[in-house]
Amino acid sequence: MARILQLTDLHLVAPGVLVSSVLDTGALLRDAVDLLLKLLPQIGPLDAVLVTGDVSDDGSPESYVAARGALDRLGLPLLVVPGNHDDRENLRAAFGDMAGMPQNGLIDWSVDVAGTPVIGLDTLVEGQGGGLLRPESLALLATALERAGTHDVLIALHHPPIRTGIRFMDAIGLANADALAEILNEFDGTARIVAGHVHGVYQGRIGRHTVLAAPSVCSAFALDCRADAPVGFMTGPRGCAVIDTAPDGAWTTIPLESANGPFSF
Ligand SMILES: [Fe+2]
């Protein structure tokens, strides 16, 4: 069974640029990696780092070079799916040596991580915030699930197939969650679906399968479900997640904020 560190929504830009004139996402990623390297002995062995999209904010080649440099410090195999902010070809250029990375077309892949089938699905539609699963991605998923038989699988995609209640985020959700549900309904095993995009912790389900969205490395969205909720981001809480794919294993988050302790009881 695999233990995987999930990082999501890094939103890197070229060094020296601030996202929305506020966030130094390069520094936030470096700080996150510094903290994680310190925590690794506590977290325990990991088999891979899975990045569930929005590696870049502007899609620039420089942003991917910066992301790759920071992520490589973790010393673990990298798995990446694109998000709505990503540029597919610039991402592929920086992560071309990744296991399962297709040489062209959509960045869908299916790999084995320590005995767990892990399937990455590309939901990026250039020029828009919302996501979509194309027929070829759904076909790859169906084939991978057929191969998995009754084994549990991990599925990674950027846009979670669940609602948050935040209107401006739900407006750019996954357009065809029903198509995903249809394929999962045919699956005899259990899938855990991990996502990003919503910059916060959300748990839901699709059929009998669990959907989990992880916090972002760089920012968050307030849970503001009012119709006139201000559209914008918060500087935190920031975080990442650890996935244990064993049947009794958990998905949990690690806050990327400093806290004091542990204090004895
Ligand atoms: Fe996103």
Image (cartoon, grey):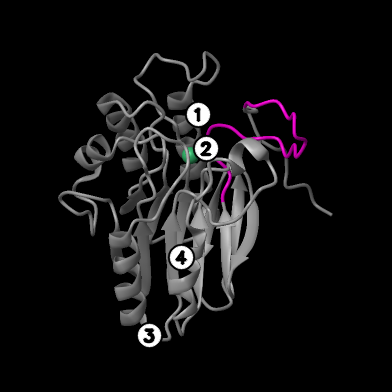
Of callouts 3 and 4, the N-terminal one:
3
Amino acid type shown at disc 4:
Leu
Residue 104 belongs to magenta span: no
Question: Would residue 256 be visible to someone looking at this image?
Answer: no
Amino acid type shown at disc 3:
Gly
How many C-alpha atoms fall within 10 Å of the one at disc 4: few (<14), some, or many (≥20)? some
Q: Which residue is mark 3?
A: 149
Residue at image x 22%, y 38%? 89
Name of the residue lying farthest toward the left: 103
Q: Which residue is mark 4?
A: 180
**Where in the figure is residue 185, as x and y percent of width and height?**
49, 78
Residue at image x 63%, y 26%? 232
How many circles with numbers are drawn on the protein?
A: 4
The mark closer to the camera, 3 or 4, is 4
Instruction: Judge left or right: residue 253 versus residue 82.
Output: right
Of callouts 2 and 4, the N-terminal one:
4
On screen, residue 158 above or below 143 = above
The residue nearer to you, when weighing 252 against 41, is: 252
| Secondary-structure class at tag 1 | helix
Quarter assignment of residue 169? top right
Q: Distance between the Cα atoms at labels 3 and 4?
A: 17 Å
Q: Which residue is mark 1?
A: 28
Q: Distance between the Cα atoms at labels 2 and 1?
A: 7 Å
Of callouts 2 and 1, the N-terminal one:
1
The numbered mark at residue 217 is 2
SS majority, magenta? loop
The mark closer to the camera, 2 or 4, is 4
Q: Distance between the Cα atoms at labels 3 and 1?
A: 40 Å
Instruction: Judge left or right: residue 112 versus residue 158.
Output: left
Q: Is mark 3 within 8 Å of ligand 1?
A: no
Q: Which residues are magenta?
A: 214-232
